[in-house]
Image (tube, coloured by chain):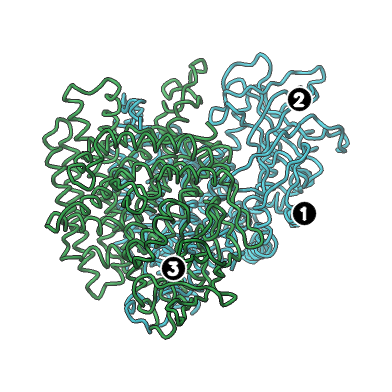
Chain colours: A cyan, B green
Amino acid sequence: MAQGTLSGRRDVDFVLHEMLNVEELSKHELFADFNRKTIDMVVSEARNFALKEILPANEEGDKGCVFENGQVKTPESFKRIFDLYCEGEWIGASEDPEFGGQGMPNVLNLAAAEFFSGASMAFMMYPGLTHGAAKMIESLGTEEQKKIYVKNMYTGKWAGTMLLTEPDAGTDVGALTTTAKKNDDGTYSITGNKIFISAGEHDMTENIIHPVLARIEGAPAGTRGISLFIVPKYRVNPDGSLGEFNDVVCTGIEEKMGIHGNATCSLTLGGKGNCIGTLLGQENKGMKAMFLMMNEARFGVGVQGFSLGATSFANAVAYAKERIQGRELLKFMDADAPSVNIIKHPDVRRQLLVMKSYVEGMRALLYYVARCFDMERVLEESDEKEKYKALIEFLIPVVKAYCTDKGFEVCVLGMQVYGGYGYIAEYPQEQLVRDCKITSIYEGTNGVQAMDLLARKLGMKGGKPLMDLMGEMGNTVAQAKAVDGLKELAESVEKASAKLGEVAMAIGQTAMSEKVLDAFGSATPFLEVTGDVVMAWLHLWRATVAAKALASGNAKKKDEAFYQGQVKTAQFFIQTLLPMAMGKMDGVKTFTSAVMEIPEDGFMQ
Amino acid sequence: MAQGTLSGRRDVDFVLHEMLNVEELSKHELFADFNRKTIDMVVSEARNFALKEILPANEEGDKGCVFENGQVKTPESFKRIFDLYCEGEWIGASEDPEFGGQGMPNVLNLAAAEFFSGASMAFMMYPGLTHGAAKMIESLGTEEQKKIYVKNMYTGKWAGTMLLTEPDAGTDVGALTTTAKKNDDGTYSITGNKIFISAGEHDMTENIIHPVLARIEGAPAGTRGISLFIVPKYRVNPDGSLGEFNDVVCTGIEEKMGIHGNATCSLTLGGKGNCIGTLLGQENKGMKAMFLMMNEARFGVGVQGFSLGATSFANAVAYAKERIQGRELLKFMDADAPSVNIIKHPDVRRQLLVMKSYVEGMRALLYYVARCFDMERVLEESDEKEKYKALIEFLIPVVKAYCTDKGFEVCVLGMQVYGGYGYIAEYPQEQLVRDCKITSIYEGTNGVQAMDLLARKLGMKGGKPLMDLMGEMGNTVAQAKAVDGLKELAESVEKASAKLGEVAMAIGQTAMSEKVLDAFGSATPFLEVTGDVVMAWLHLWRATVAAKALASGNAKKKDEAFYQGQVKTAQFFIQTLLPMAMGKMDGVKTFTSAVMEIPEDGFMQ
């Protein structure tokens, strides 16, 4: 009980197979190995590993890393599971076997990742960042860079990071001051200070590879003058062996609210004038490289937010079934009535249903987007491929912001279900809240995501991405209308989708008018209602699949409650939570002038 | 910057004087001393003390208490400020001078308390619990008990607690098993284990007085057999001197998410058969005593939630004015444009306005209710007195649940405004989030508050309390309609108030039908929309006062921005946040059957 548990796999199977039919990906040569049996085996293996090895390490991880003399000591248990994780070849699970990967579809990799992150987000940041850095080198590196680094990183021999933030350059990357001076041999000498570097220094691997954003001497100001470099902690000789220390010095780690097991480092590069990097990609194209990796990175953060919520929900359900407290409401005044498990109480059920709606809605969204990535990979240039690309672009900011906000909200509710025990460190719920909070902040704050949605994604290709998305919603609505008992729910989703279209049109137009700032003042609630309507759509989809399975008469006995649960969750979301989104859309449509008109001194207290 | 700041006093003055005219309380003999000058002096003194003494202690407090050999060592800085706090006679600020109090109105005491709690909630729990325990003895004790304890507690010579929770008796108080056996001398021998006892053991005072809920041998099961006892840590001789240790042993303190400076203790009473208590009030009337104290206790927790939010808001505004990051939105593409303070960015302004709406809305609500307490105290039996009583009863669960939920939400937003720095312990925002979270859980979870509102308060006296509240709203609407520029806002509030009335009627009726459980499944959103509409009403009231002040032409120059801020905040809340409540009311009205119909196994994941 104290350690907590993880999501079961029933709903993962439902999304993979009954909603998305991911087995069909195996028709494409790239994923030919991934038939149903293999998929199920991977999911089993991942969940087992997460439950038996990663989850037990998470509480020790919360005690944090130790910084001494420039060294970071990570929790012992983390080192042990990192090795096991690498043995399982999980870092490169979805990557090319040529570089040590397993070549699995993104959507399957996600099923594994949700259990891993849900078991220990702080731990998973080590392999996660390593994967991201390696992927960047695989995408942009020279043959030589690829040969030296990529396989060593996908196999976990070396770790990776991302050195972007500086004290005065957070959201505004263009303000960074780290410099790179070209040497005669074509390498660069790097000098600067970076902060908030997750896994910036640790003792889990023999080397750490830092992709670093810096400005080449004489380059333009702002984002147009930023280049990307590979800066290893220890230099790498041409034969792959390690050379001397590369003057990347950790000057401290942050005390923070959560993810204590992952060291957040301040790094000084070239403090002794001895830090050498090689250019990754082209000069002054560092920001372009960032954008190239952005979808994957932001998707990954959405997965973090979601998966902590999923774990909190799994804990809350288990606790609510086990914890005995109070009598049934209708027997409240009868002192002789037996005490019951708290899942009998209406308000506890309501809380669990709110959590379930968001967790399962987010799971469907994330798997849907992951499958879009896979489809984009396997398809030749075509309208269909363009559709998947567009859906990805449009949905990524929603995934990042909505799944981290709602994931956090779910974690908070999961504490509440535990009552006083939820606030106590002995139980798992409060750590989930603390760990989850960072996800709304890093990798572009959620406010930045909302601006991305409004400024870049909404108007892309004349609004095609949103139209494609609404087309998908329309398909689901049409199917649901034909299913017994779902007609009213389908009509509500249809109305919500139409209203979202109107609001999108209105905010797009306002953003191009003299009221542009008022539009941007409504960007966040616009992103939020987009997420809400997406949830409603996906719940309707779920309910359609479940209702058909029930109606077929072929559902296994033990699956019946699960399917009924799907239908009831859709009903709950669409009847009680969707109406809030409808009201919120009314709020967005006012494009209130108050946000920009209130004088700065009007915030006086 | 790192330590943070506190709310200014401009808005406190606005609520005290311009909205509520609290000076008029001095017309009543009880408060004759509290003229404008005295009121202003008290507020100044409280804010100064909070800012200069309490706030600097809060960060050290977060490092926590130490438990060794049954002793709890509190942070050194807390002991120092506790003595200063007692010297200032703040514990009994609103109490009878006969017992060491200062006799000030509740509403003025609240103005002090918001600064104190906002500076350090963990610290304020020590004097707060001491006050509550003393008040209980003052209300229920024999002359002798009052003589021995009350003054010593109001002056802080001795501290107090409340021993209620046991491992299997949290929300269900009636399940408690601590027993009391009557001795020949009329005292009782107490035996039992209590948990989650805030300030249950510490080294700040020479004695700690525990009010304890226990069951007298042979008493009925459930809440009807619970009695209340005074159990001091050290026995007290008839002359007031301390006697022997009373066998109240602290067996451990909890590691928890926040309020680290306040020890949360497990206490064993009578482990050596040597714990003696005296009955407080009547046998088997312990729950009645709890109810007597409940309004004050729940109000106090609402104040905690609010005041941490207020501090987070004050910090966020200061940070947003100071932190330079990024260019103005309209100059985004111009690399040569200067970087600006982030309060210029629309999404940051929006976040600040959300925080401002809730903080100032809650402040108005709490001061309004505190003034109701005062009016109830000074009035003779009359319809008017009954009105204040009814408003208090109805609003207390809203105050407790809404102010703690929204206070927490504001704290979370306050982190977000800080970006990455918000997550770092060096800055004040993350501690506020951690400290605040407990307020939605203790003193009756917020779910319990929602049940209280629906089951006890809504139908009280044929629904009079809500009608009285709606009458108050109607008055404000009528006044606002006559003010230039507020007509539309007034109409929106009028509609929301009417809709709240409909929803209240519907949920009340549903709760008396066979769909009673569905009604209770909607109790929490019903409480939430009640709070939302109350916020809208109070913002309209604020805007009316502010608009009149602006129109009068007499407003001081430096006040103009403040008043404009009031009008714009009302506009923001009513145009963008109130519509969400309108939608949420639609959701409540469905009384969805999904909550109760989903099978327990339907939560399978």
The answer to whether tags 2 and 1 share a subunit is yes
Residue A540 image position (x, y, % from top left): 39, 60
Of A5 and B399, nearer the camera is B399
Residue wearing tag 3: B230
Marks 3,1: beta carbons within 8 A: no
Chain letter of disc 2?
A
Residue drawn at 45 percent across, 66 percent down? B238
Q: Which mark is residue A442?
A: none
In the rendered structure, the answer to whether residue B517 lies left or right of residue B204 reads: left
Which quarter of the picture shows residue B349?
A: top left
- Taking depth in this image into account, of B3 and A502 the one nearest to the observer is B3
| Mark 3: secondary structure | strand
Amino acid residing under circle 3: Ile
Q: Which residue is mark 2?
A: A270
Quadrant in the picture for residue A187: top right
Q: Is residue A56 above or below residue A95?
A: below
Label 1 crowding class (10 Å Cα cut-off): few <14, some 14-19, many 20+?
A: some
* Position in image of residue B122 (x %, y %): 50, 49
Query: Which comes before the other along the chain, label 2 or label 1?
Result: 1
Q: Secondary structure at mark 2?
A: loop
Residue A84 screen position, x and y as percent: 76, 57
Q: Residues within 10 Å of mark 2 (few under 14, many from 20)?
A: many
Q: CA distance from mark 3 to mark 2?
A: 67 Å
Give the spatial CA distance, label 2 vs label 1. 31 Å
Does residue B206 appear to the left or right of B349 in the view shown? right
Any part of residue A533 in sight = no
Mark seen at residue A83 = 1
Kindly report which numbered mark, 3 or 1, lies closer to the viewer in this rendering: 3
Q: Nearer the viewer, mark 3 or mark 2?
A: 3
